[in-house]
Amino acid sequence: MIVMKFGGTSVGSTEAIGATAAIVAQKVAEQAKTTRPGVVVVTSAMSGVTNALIDSAQAAALGDETPYREARSSLLVKHQMVCGQLIEDGVERAALGRLFDSRLREFERLCRSIAVLGELTERGMDVVSGMGERLSAPLLAAVLRANGVRAQFIDAGELIITDDTYGSASPLMEQTFARCIDRLLPMVQSGVVPVITGFVAATEKGIPTTLGRGGSDYSGAIIGAALDVDEIQIWTDVDGVLTADPRIVKNARCLEELTYEEVAELAFYGAKVLHPKTVTPAIEKKIPVRVLNTFNPSHPGTRIVESTPNRPLGVKAITAIKDMQMITVAGRGMMGVPGIAARTFGAVARQSANVLMISQSSSEQSICFVVPGKEGPRVVQSLQAEFERELKQHLIENIHSQNEIVIVAVVGTGMKGVPGIAARVFNALGTHNINVIAIAQGASEANISLVVIRAEADKAVQAIHDAFELGIGD
Ligand code: ADP
Ligand code: ASP
Ligand code: MG
């Protein structure tokens, strides 16, 4: 039994949906020959749709009603077109047409009320942003049926139960697993392929939530872990996980294998190919995750497992996360004063800010850390309030922040205990005159992260990629 998750580009056009349907049909046939057959499909929205939905709702909140009206008709056309080209059965087509129309009417109603209120809550946003999957999944199910696969659409709101952290909800695993098993297993065992909305979920009370941008990967993994599948497949538009973002590094190479830990580090530090939480559900049950290319399906892709053979020096891949802000709390009066770090991070935590990297100089005269740019101003304010007295007394000289910085992360579990990695990184950056603003090593030693200015980030990624010869195969 396998889960196959298809990303936005894999369902982004008539041709892509056609290719996806052929891949699923083939896997269903292959699975039928195994001892525990079954295919479960999870899909994203058609590419660009989630952005269009979000942009329209945001514009509505500012009083601009044109974008949602235009989005309603363009989204209707976009989905109808695929339906018209890939589904011959008139009854299926008519049913889908009605479904698209009613969903998009709901979208329009929601946006209208957002415009009237002039306010967009996180809860309202989750209803709007999840509509794309609620259009694409029934469409894909119908296309699969047109290709002879016994497919049935299921809304993940019935399966994935989360808390009410709208915009980035956390699943309640026990209930979610129970629901997946109850609802999906009998279907799969009777030879039906469930086609499930990625990204979306619901609270216990049935209020729609989402798992965060790019969250369909996570949906696939949650469902895969619940059903204890043999493999969780993430079908996307590149051959697998590459040694670096192919948009930055032209000679980035597809990795045959990676560990869960490595892929989690890469995703956390911005490698968009997988949502950062994707591997968590797979780890406990040791389910292999495979990243595959819908547009090159014969390529074996990247297999993500518990452990893999090491490369010399242990570095596997480089990634970068942009739009960060570095905040420094500095002052001579901090030296030897206990509790400064605790108070600093207490103030950060009160803003629920996400700290991506911490570095303290050994002289204890400064603590610096990195948060997403949009969280920076709140954090600085909170720190100024926390250290008001120390700032007045000049025990803390200043709380300084630097915008538009990038964290570059060098990732590989095999780096543990290998000397000279940091030296090689610095050497590569020095040769290219790239200034390193801060550096930190994760406790697991699976990553070294450094901060550079935005203008130098791509050059830094390429330079480190070259220094470790990552473009050259084993
Ligand atoms: P999907 O819609 O299938 O979920 P995404 O756009 O979310 O696809 O993720 C795939 C994209 O991630 C690729 O097209 C590639 O540009 C980008 N990417 C960034 N870093 C990497 C990497 N290290 N390996 C592979 N792809 C990467
Ligand atoms: N459609 C959602 C997004 O664009 C989820 C996903 O694609 O994984 O963020
Ligand atoms: Mg994605």
Image (cartoon, grey):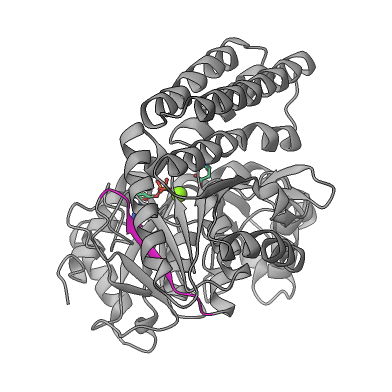
| Front-most of residues 409 and 370 | 409
Specify whether 325 is left or right of 311: right
Residue 191 in percent (x, y) is at 53, 60
Residue appearing at x 75%, y 62% in the figure: 346
Indicate whether residue 244 is drawn in magenta.
no
| Front-most of residues 287 and 91 | 91
Residue appearing at x 62%, y 12% in the figure: 64
**Residue 368 visible in the displayed image:** no
Residue 458 in percent (x, y) is at 29, 50
Residue appearing at x 48%, y 74% in the figure: 230
Judge whether 413 appears above or below 157 on screen.
Answer: below
Residue 251 in percent (x, y) is at 17, 57
Judge whether 452 appears above or below 44 on screen.
Answer: below
- Residue range in magenta is 286-295
Looking at the image, the residue that sits furthest to the left is: 472
Specify whether 326 is left or right of 467: right
Judge whether 284 appears above or below 82 on screen.
Answer: below
Residue 57 in percent (x, y) is at 63, 24
| Front-most of residues 10 and 268 | 10
**Residue 64 visible in the displayed image:** yes
Specify whether 335 is left or right of 24: right
| Front-most of residues 348 and 70 | 70
- Which of the 4 quarters of the picture holds residue 266? bottom left
- Which of the 4 quarters of the picture holds residue 367? bottom right
- Which of the 4 quarters of the picture holds residue 13? top left
Image quadrant in which the C terminus is located: bottom left
